[in-house]
């Protein structure tokens, strides 16, 4: 994967606001509370996980399950996999 694209993805994740997460959750049918959205946003802002790396993604989804619950994390993971397939960018994510 192009390191520029990887850096852009990481930068965007660090800038995500709780209100964005609540909006996306509503749009995609993944319920979040305001407190959960704040915790997720803070986690993303303060971590250096690489979302293009499978090991790092799994670490994120485990943290998401701790913040929310396992069912919500599984929904988010399923949505992530569907979106990268729909946009044809599976090769960017190992």
Image (tube, rainbow, N blue to C red):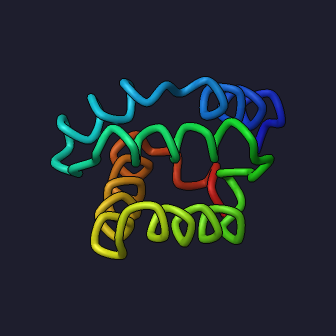
Which quadrant of the rendered structure holds the N terminus? top right
The answer to whether 12 appears left or right of 3 in the picture is: left
Nearest the eye: 19 or 2: 19
Number of dots carrying numbers: 0
Please tell me whether residue 3 is drawn above or below residue 55 in the rendered image: above
Nearest the eye: 6 or 50: 50
Position of residue 23 measured from the top left corner of the image (x, y, whole percent): 27, 29
Residue at point 75%, 47% (across, down): 47
Position of residue 65 measured from the top left corner of the image (x, y, whole percent): 44, 69
Which quadrant of the rendered structure holds the C terminus? bottom right
Residue at point 53%, 54% (across, down): 90
Nearest the eye: 65 or 24: 65
Position of residue 12 measured from the top left corner of the image (x, y, whole percent): 62, 26
Residue projecting furthest to the bottom:
70
Residue projecting furthest to the front:
35
**Which of the 4 quarters of the picture holds residue 93?**
bottom right
Residue at point 38%, 66% (across, down): 73
Please tell me whether residue 55 is drawn above or below residue 87 in the rendered image: below
**Which of the 4 quarters of the picture holds residue 8?**
top right
The answer to whether 30 appears left or right of 36 in the picture is: left
Position of residue 18 measured from the top left corner of the image (x, y, whole percent): 43, 30
Nearest the eye: 84 or 77: 77
Residue at point 29%, 64% (across, down): 75
The answer to whether 66 appears left or right of 19 in the picture is: right
């Amino acid at each position: 994967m192009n390191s520029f694209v990887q850096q852009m993805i990481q930068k965007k994740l660090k800038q995500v606001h709780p209100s964005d997460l609540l909006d996306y959750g509503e749009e995609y049918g993944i319920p979040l509370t305001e407190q959960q959205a704040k915790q997720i946003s803070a986690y993303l802002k303060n971590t250096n996980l690489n979302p293009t790396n499978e090991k790092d993604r799994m670490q994120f989804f485990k943290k998401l399950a701790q913040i929310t619950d396992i069912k919500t994390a599984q929904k988010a993971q399923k949505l992530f996999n569907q979106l990268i397939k729909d946009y044809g960018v599976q090769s960017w994510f190992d």
